[in-house]
Amino acid sequence: MKVTKTEQEWREQLSPEAFAVCRQHGTEAPFSGKYYDNKDAGIYKCVCCGAPLFESSTKFDSGTGWPSYYEAIEDAVREVKDMSHGMIRVEVRCSNCDAHLGHVFPDGPEPTGMRYCINSVCLDFQKE
């Protein structure tokens, strides 16, 4: 079920940093997020709505300072063309609540060759 809330409801639910990134398309500083170096097994979920997004088995160290995954859980995210900041990129959003999560790039490892570069503040982690 799709999650829709007012801006005020999101502000009340999320930390100021999570609101800025998830709802206003911001970015956390590299190497500052709580999950960029997490190696525990489990599921990464959307901080806004709790939808499962990424399995820890698809996480890899991209060296960028953000959690990176080579694959999202099926139908968990949607990709949107992003032409902000004078660049053409592909934004990654939660399919369930439309939260901005990060961007995806075609420079990841096999088997997909993709790198989902995701802000830690957009995620909750459920350890196995």
Image (cartoon, grey):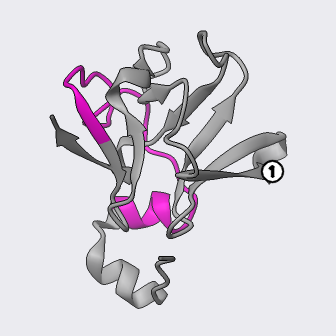
**In this rendering, is residue 105 above or below 1?**
above
Identity of the residue drawn at 55% across and 30% down: 71
Residue at the spot of label 1: 81
The magenta segment? 17-43
**Label 1 environment density (alpha carbons within 10 Å; few <14, some 14–19, many ≥20):** few
Q: Secondary structure at mark 1?
A: strand
Q: Amino acid at mark 1?
A: Lys
Identity of the residue drawn at 77% across and 40% down: 89
Q: How many marks?
A: 1
Q: Position of residue 93 (x, y in %)?
A: 59, 55
Identity of the residue drawn at 78% across and 50% down: 82
Q: Is residue 73 magenta?
A: no
Identity of the residue drawn at 24% across and 20% down: 39
| Most foreground residue, 90 or 8 | 90
Image quadrant in which the C terminus is located? top left
Q: Position of residue 59 (x, y in %)?
A: 41, 23
